[in-house]
Amino acid sequence: MSTGSMWAKTRPDVIVVGGGAAGMMAALQAAWAGAQVMLLEKNEKLGKKIYITGKGRCNVTNACDTEDFFRQVPRNSKFLNAAVRQFGHEDVTSLLEMLGTPTKVERGNRVFPVSDKASDVTRAFSRGMRDAGVQVKLDTSVRQILREEDGFAVKLEDGGVLHAKAVVVATGGLSYPSTGSTGDGYAFAKENGHAVTPLTGSLVGLTIDEKWPKLLMGLSLKNVRVSAQMGRKKIYDELGEMLFTHFGVSGPLIIELSSHMPEDFGAVQVSLDMKPGLSGEQVDLRLQREFQENVRKQLSSVLVALMPARMGPVFAGLCGLSPEQPINQITREQRAAIAKNLKALPLRVTGTRPIEEAIVTRGGVEVKEVSPSTMMSKLAPGLFFAGEVLDVDAHTGGFNLQIAFSTGALAGKSAAAYAAEA
């Protein structure tokens, strides 16, 4: 008897498609709510994306207050109101503690497992699901999710068909396709009448119009400030670290900036402040002092005191000067250009790197078509969505995993309740 024909006789109350953070949480909560639950995961193991979060340590959530959490969600934050208030960061840490994985809070309220091992988070959910009676089917790809008279038919790639009263789609987005996030959930949503908003990368490197960043490839700048202005409105202004790459810029500051950028990159002026601790006037005074003390030297030897040596010649060129130019020949106007660029070096952003390189996906299932109080489709009753497949994403720091856990918990509980009444 084939696997498909065996499963055809199995009818769980709830099927969860996707075994990542949102899917595991949904399956666990649905089972705890009394439903017979089956989780289908296309990969050979659960939580593949969890393994790479937080550089392998898994930044499970952020211990900020609820209002601050919503400020970290640039789009559709109101949609998350019920989910986050019903299952917040304290619920996540309590659940993990109960499942044998205690957590700790680090800089920026970032929460990690005490062990610093992302694998412990996945193992905790695996134990919880096993104890709750969830049937976990690995190496199982779903081809279609179709409405039928008394629920849904879940068609598998191997030809098998499963049936359930409710289905939770928690298949992730398009970022990191090596983890199994290949956009399957968007197809399932469309088949059931849903719109999917444009899909792009968020929390990803940015491409730059000019070629000079490539000359600095691999160079990291610490304690600098990156800001972005859209008209008169400042949309980003943070202190931290950035990195020059072969395509433009990346690193923590830039990755976070990417989630603030609008679709029209040309409308935003991004600038780099290499001396954020000094005012423009103080920078000019510093330059005057450096020039007076090194009057017989070349510009490049003075710039070494202000930036990494490798950046000096490139920076001089951006100021319209030669690195070999003698200090005693630099005019007041040229010194002003150096000071200006030290405080606000333009970064002409043209776009983002491919979505495959992004930490999360921007865009997804249109949230106007999903009930925020249950995560259930308004178009196909009994179909629920959770996690990155939805058009919701946040900044770095544990906020995206919290979204996955919050929406997963609500979808799982709601799916169990729906199945019980169906």
Image (cartoon, helix red, strand yellow):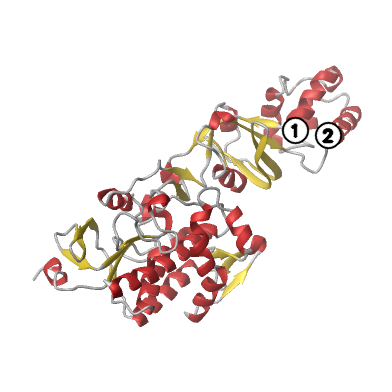
Query: Image point 54% across, 63% down: which residue?
Result: 59
Give amino acid for label 2: Val
In the displayed structure, does residue 363 sit left or right of residue 256?
left
Instruction: Compare marks 2 and 1 and give the one earlier in the sequence.
Output: 2
Closer-to-camera residue (117/323): 117
The residue carrying mark 2 is 283
In this rendering, the answer to whether 371 lies above or below 351 is below
Could you say where residue 320 lies in the image, as x and y percent from the top left?
71, 19
| Secondary element type, mark 1 | helix
Q: Quadrant of residue 398?
A: bottom right
- Between 12 and 329, the one lying in front of the other is 12
Q: Is residue 13 visible?
A: yes
Is the Cβ of the residue at disc 2 closer than 8 Å to that at disc 1?
A: yes
**Residue under the image location 75 percent in, 21 percent down:** 324
Which SS class for mark 2? Answer: helix
Around disc 2, counting alpha carbons within 10 Å, would you say few (fewer than 14), some (14 to 19), or many (20 or more)? many
Looking at the rendering, in which quadrant would you find the N terminus? bottom left
- Taking 306 as reference, is 7 left or right? left
Give the left or right position of residue 342, taking residue 349 as reference. right
Residue 56 can be seen, yes or no: no
x, y percent for residue 160: 15, 63
Tag 1 residue: 342
Looking at the figure, which quarter contains the C terminus? bottom left
Q: Name the kind of residue labelled 1 in the image.
A: Leu
